[in-house]
Amino acid sequence: MEKYLLGVDSGSTVTKAALFDLRGKEIAVASCQSNTDYPHPGWTERDMDVLWQTTATAIRAVLTKSQIKPEQIAGIGNTGHGNGLYLLDKTGQSLRPGIQSMDTRASEILVEWNQRDLHAKVFPFTIQSFWPAQPNALLAWIKRNEPQNYEQIGAILLVKDYIKYRLTGEISSDFTDMSATSLMDVRNKCYSRELLALYDLAEVFDALPPLKNSYQVAGQVTRTVAEETGLVAGTPVVGGLFDVDASAIGCGVVNPGQACIVAGTWSINEVITQKPIVAPELFMTTIFANSDLFITIEGSATSATNLEWFVAQCCGDERAEAKRRGISVYEVCNEQVASLAPGSSNIIFHPFLYGSNVQPSARAGFYGIAGWHTRAHLLRALYEGVVFGHLNHIEKLKTAGAKIESARLAGGGSRSQVWTQIFADTLELPLQVSDGNELGARGAALSAGIGAGIYHDYVEAVQQAVSIVRIQEPIAANTPLYLARYAEYRRLIGAMQMPWQELSKLD
C-alpha cells in the first residue's frame, strides 16, 4: 500500500493541509480561511477553538479531495507563523484568544526595555532582536494588563504547537520555533531561568513546553480527532517547525552555506551555518530543524505583499485583461514588467507598505514619477524595490559573516521569471527555483517522513523529494543598472528619515 505524508501549515490568514507522496509530489491541498479579530488598534487575535475547527475542516477536505485511504498516511508534520502567543490554562483549555505575529500591543513594553538597556543583558542568551509580537513581550504585557490570565497560564505555546496539542493531546514545542521567541538560551539549546527573570517572568518558567526535534514523534492522533478529521487514530505526529525552516526544507535548503530567499508575505533571507552568527544588528539566529546547525534570518514585511496591494488598488485594467484571457492578473503584471528593459526607468519604490527594517515610521513611496510614465513603469519600480529590500538584508547577513555559496528563491515572487531574473541580476547570484507550491507544508511533511523512518535525515529527504525546475543565471550587463538604482534607494532612505517621523505625527 502506497504511503503519503500530511503537512499542515497554519498561516496568519489561511490554514492549509497538503498531502505529498514520498517523492515530494503534491497530491492534494485544501485551504480554509483563518479567523482574525482586531479588538483594538494594533491587536490581531483569533479564537483558538475556531482555529482548530478550521484546521480539522482543512484536513478532512484534503482527505476527501485526494481520495486516499487515511491509513495510508505514514506521518503528520505541521508548521505555522512564528511568534505570537497561544496560551493554555492549567486545565489544558485555551486561556484567551491566540495572539498572532503581526500584533503590536506590546510596543510600549519594548520601549521600556530599551530604556533599561535590557536587550544588552538578554542578547547573550537570545542572539536576536526584540519584536513586539514575540512571546517574551506579550507575556510581560499580559502580566501587566491581564493579571488574572497570567496567574492561570498552564502552557506557553506557538500556533503550530496548539494545533499539535489538539491533534495529540500532548503539550510540546520544538527547537526551531521556540528558539525564535527570545525565551531560549539559543547557543546552549535550552530554557534559562535567569533569562526569564531578566524579563520579570520567572513565574511562568514551568509553563514552557518540553522541546522536541522537528522530526521527533511528539504524539499520535487521538480517537476524538480521528472522528473530527477522518484521520486514523494512532497516526504519528512529529514535533513540527518554524515556518521559515519549513520553507527552507520544502525548497531543498538543508546544508551550511545554502541560503533561502522567500519573496512572500515577508522578505525572508536566511542562511544555514554550522555555528551561530552572533550580531546584534541582525534580526535573529535560531536553531535549525537539523539541531546540529543554526539558521540566521534577516527579514521584514517588505516583499511580495506590496504587489498584492498594488494589484488590488491600482490594476483594474490588468484584472479585466486577465479575466478576459483566462490567466492570473500577476501574469499580466509580469508581462508589463518584461516589456520594459532594465534601466528604462529611474523610478524608485520603497516597499514599506506594512512596515520596514529601516525605521519604525517608514512608509512606502514612489519617487521620480513623471507624466510620461505608465503603470508598467510603476510595476517595474515595485518589482525592483522589493528586490532592493531583500538585497539590504543579504548585505547585512554577509557583513555579519554569513557565507552564501548557493541560494534558492521561494514564495510567490519565485513564480515570476522576470522577477527572479531581477533578483539574480541584483544579488549577483544564480538563483535556483524548486518544484512545488506548498513549500512550507512540504517541509513539515518531510519532517514527518523522518519521524516515520522513511528518510534517514533532511539531506536524504530533500534528495528524494525536492527537484530544481530552473536556475536563473545573473546577466552581468544588468547588474550595474540595478545597483545604481539601489544606491539611490539607500540615499532616499537617508533623506526620508525626518519626513517619515513628521508624517507619522499627522496620523
Image (cartoon, helix red, strand yellow):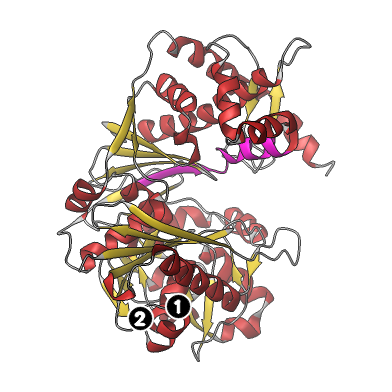
Foreground of the two, 32 or 446: 32
Q: Which residue is mark 1?
A: 229
Q: Nearer the viewer, mark 1 or mark 2?
A: 1
Which residue type carries mark 2? Val
280 sits to left or right of 140: left
Please state the extent of the stretch shown in magenta in the rendering.
295-312
Q: Position of residue 373 (x, y in %)?
A: 72, 13
Foreground of the two, 494 or 1: 1
413 sits to left or right of 502: left
Which residue type carries mark 1? Thr
Identify the element where label 1 is drawn: helix
Nearest to N terminus: mark 1 or mark 2: 2
**Residue at the extreme bottom of the image, as rendered:** 91
503 sits to left or right of 309: right
Q: Residue at coordinates 52% horizontally, 12% vertically from top-left? A: 342
Assess whether residue 169 is covered by the magenta stretch.
no
The answer to whether residue 183 is above or below residue 342 is below
Q: Quadrant of the N terminus?
A: bottom left
Foreground of the two, 411 or 73: 73
CB contact under 8 Å: marks 1 and 2: yes
Q: Position of residue 348 (x, y in %)?
A: 63, 20
Q: Which mark is residue 165?
A: none
Foreground of the two, 64 or 215: 64
How many labels, in total?
A: 2
Q: CA distance from mark 1 to mark 2?
A: 10 Å
Q: Which residue is mark 2?
A: 221
Assess whether residue 308 is covered by the magenta stretch.
yes
Q: Residue at coordinates 49% horizontally, 15% vertically from top-left? A: 483
Identify the element where label 2 is drawn: loop
User: Is residue 72 visible from the viewing direction of this image?
Assistant: yes
Quadrant hosting residue 317: top right
Quadrant hosting residue 230: bottom left
